[in-house]
Amino acid sequence: MSKCAVITGITGQDGAYLSKLLLAKDYRVVGFTPRRGSDTHWRLREMGVIDSIEFTYGDVTDLASILRVIDRFKPDEIYNLAAQSFVAASWDEPAHTAEVNAIGVSNVLEAIRQADTKARFYQASTSEMFGKIQTPMQDESTPFYPRSPYGVSKLYGHWITVNYRESFGLHASSGILFNHESPLRGIEFVTRKVSDAAARIKLGLASELYLGNLEAMRDWGFAGDYVEAMWLMLQQPEPGDYVVATGVNTTVREMCRLAFEHVDLDYRDYVKTDPRYLRPAEVDVLLGNPAKARAVLGWRPRTALRDLIEMMVEADLRRLRGD
């Protein structure tokens, strides 16, 4: 009999890629999502999986709705991807960010405990928890120093997962994922902002792009690779926490160069800096050490940054041309 997986935040980038992966492994995939009026399912449609997913409505801020889903579907695995995931917005909406990213995690864990289920739990942690870095490369033992309400809220979610694992014996794992991108990335994120702008400028639909700190460095990988690490964590006999990263970092400036070079343009002619896009507290460098994920999970990233950026630019060109 195939396994059943419940995915919160299924309409996001990671939810779409994870759904495709699990369906290919013959899972029954249940999407746990709040009711919303606008089309939030476009990523699932673009991935060609929307008709294979069972949707149920609820919210991670509502414990009762999570309990209902566990009782109805009796999942083998629960992937908590629901989040207010845009770092910049967390300064404008700190309470909402905390409610979803912190209390929401507590609710899912408490529902698993109350239901007395053997469901395995995955928590989407983030490299933003490292924030003001304490070591040149960050691994599972690196001290955390978050620099945004988003990072602080995610740190609570991370530690409450550890706490429930140690207190109640839950098979609960956290993936400390570094920046992972794809053509399904939201337009508010810098990689997609850059790929979209490169495509628009190439097609004559825009003339410039304004960004914040071009010297910020990130460890960027492909979301389609990273969801495999999520699944692998829940297949292990023992739960744990894992850094998922490429081990290579790149400046925003270099990422711009790659995107514009793909459409035969020089980014220096179009990319401008604007102080409005600087964060109140900047995270200058993030660089992950995925040695544990390699050793225990057998996981390695397969997609190079250049290939990823070119994939994103091509997808935006197709969208803008209406292909």
Image (tube, rainbow, N blue to C red):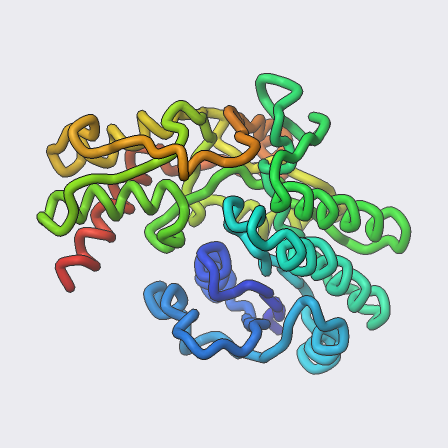
Q: Image quarter for residue 176?
A: top right
> Residue shown at 9%/48% (left/top)?
204
Quadrant of image for the N terminus: bottom right
User: Is any part of residue 102 visible from this angle?
Assistant: yes
> Residue shown at 13%/59% (left/top)?
321
> Residue shown at 84%/65% (left/top)?
113
- Rendered view: 143 above or below 78: above
- Rendered view: 184 above or below 265: below
Residue 143 appears left or right of 91? right
> Residue shown at 82%/50% (left/top)?
165
Q: Image quarter for residue 292?
A: top right
- Rendered view: 183 above or below 221: below
Residue 192, percent from left and from top: 34, 46
Farthest residue to the top: give it: 136
- Rendered view: 83 above or below 267: below
Say which of 147 and 8 sits in front: 147
Quadrant of image for the C terminus: bottom left
User: Is any part of residue 25 visible from this angle?
Assistant: no
Numbered circles on residues, count: 0
Residue 2, percent from left and from top: 59, 71
Residue 245, percent from left and from top: 52, 34
Residue 235 appears left or right of 247? right
Residue 262, percent from left and from top: 18, 35
Say which of 290 and 88 sits in front: 88
Say which of 71 and 274 sits in front: 274
